[in-house]
Amino acid sequence: MADVAITGLAAMSALGRGPAAQLSGVLAGSATFTPVDRFDTDARRVRLAATLPDAGTLTDELAAAIGEACRDGGLRGPADVPVLLAVHGHPAAARSGRAADGRPLRTAAHLAAELTERLGLAGVPRVYTSACVSAGNAVADAAAMITTGRLDRVVVAAGYLVESDQFALFDAGRGLATDGAVRPFSTGRTGLLLGDAVAAVVLESVAAAGARGVTDAARLLGWARTGDGFHPVQPHPRGDGMARAIRQALGRAGLDAGEVGHVNAHGTGSPMSDAAEAAALAEVFDSVAVSATKSVHGHALEASVLLELVITVLALRAGELPLTAGFLAADPACPVNVITDAPVTSPSSISDTAVSVNAAFGGANTALVVRAA
Amino acid sequence: MSGLRVLAEARWPAEAGPGEPPPVVAGYLLSSFNPLVADVAERCLAAHHGERPAPPAEGADTAIVLVSASGDATSAEHVAATVDDGRSVGPLFFFQSVPNSIAGHVAARWGLAGPLTCLCPTGDALADGLDQARLLLDDGAARSALVICVEQGGGPNGADSAAAVLVTGDRHR
């Protein structure tokens, strides 16, 4: 199976704008959660999120990220590039009303059309609305499109900016952390906190990248998407589907688990989800360094996988692995080696290969295996 | 059909009962979206497999591709109105806030453990869904795929519509 080159990166989050801000932020390990002033939270139990104060509209931020990733990848710009887009929906969908035939007037496809027109894209062949694995599905599909010869080059873009409706839903569902911190795999964890993220990644065949003389930032060696087939919203308690995703991705990459030096975990800080993920990681790996960067930048829902992929690539290239904020003490239900006190800084002690793992409602899982170029 | 073979299909409204609402799905409120997904998926899978669950060897490699432009517009509009009124949202809406949830409901009932993908179509919904199924099969990620297309509105007199088709590759099964 051919590798896929990752040649361009762009990202924004509460850590700041640009890839360098993401890397320095997760290596510093300081959480970015502050009181939300973007909308009214008076009726909510929780009032914190990780937001970037000068964030623009989702359309503007996506357009900027796509352009920046293309330029980072040595392309003139996004014109004539196909984009796979991962979003919750059109930001105005629920407040735009219906057409005479009952159809919503604004959908995610309209957002894709706006980006296509503004940037002169070759089109948006897919818009992913698969919740927290949307961008993972998009990256895996992009790789499949490249390795099956459908496309030479594709941009995956994803965005979520903290807004009132998802905030209210997570609050109502008791999904948000009640003590102001996200504590993945730790005792005392109470839930997740939401965060802004817009990211874009250029993926292309190694041959296409080589033909235009660009140096790839990393290689995507393996990818997988699986389902638990267990429950509408709860993860399989033993992490069966996630373990299968990791194994499939490693198998595609031709790697043993022992050849992986780092896992960027889904790690939401939710009691049940973290325990299931830890079971999956323990099932696959004897011991591997685990980071859960949502503890720093929050959970960006449909954009989370792409932000975390960007961070994973940057960390591998830097030879430093992010730490996990908010960790109080090891939870016996989460037998994983969480990087907590300081980034792992010795390049000689770590592999240059990492796995980024994610999961979503519906029992959906994705695993992406990347190696620094 | 681009190298795909149809194993079973189902539509809503069903021929036997046009206009009948789809059966209620326990735990899902207010909106037709989730019952429509469950109904066409159930009848499509039953037409091929008979009783639940699917044989493990088949279910393990069956993907779900849920395609909808509208998504669950009814629930999203309800949540937006509730938020705009400064009120608290009912907790059950959290669990139906993404289409993955009802797709996971189908996966759990039938033991389907392949990839789960939800898409907003940028072209014809069924064509987009089948193209995604073809991609998953070509990638070795699945051996069959249940493609479900659901829209709130858009039909005669603003009616909803839903269809499901179970497909496999020509070389499979």
Image (spheres, coloured by chain):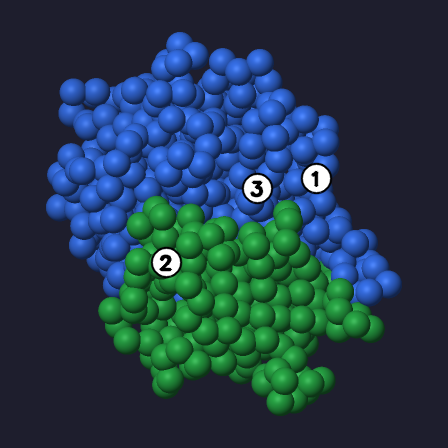
Quadrant of the image occupied by residue A341: top left
**Residue position marked by numbered label 1 in the rendering:** A113
Colour in which the image shows chain B = green
- The location of residue B41, given as percent across then percent down, is 50, 74
**Residue position marked by numbered label 2 in the rendering:** B169
Secondary structure beneath disc 2?
strand
Q: Residue at x 75, y 51 (%)?
A: A106
Whether the residues at callouts 2 and 3 have beta carbons within 8 Å, the answer is no
Colour in which the image shows chain A = blue
Q: Is residue A187 visible?
A: no
**Residue position marked by numbered label 3 in the rendering:** A125
Determine the residue located farthest toward the top in the rendered image: A213
Q: How many marks?
A: 3
Residue nearest the viewer, comparing A216 with A275: A216
Distance CA(mark 2)–CA(mark 3): 21 Å
Up the image or down, A348 lies above or below A100; here it is above
What subunit carries mark 3? A
User: Left or right: where does residue B150 sit relative to residue B133?
Assistant: right
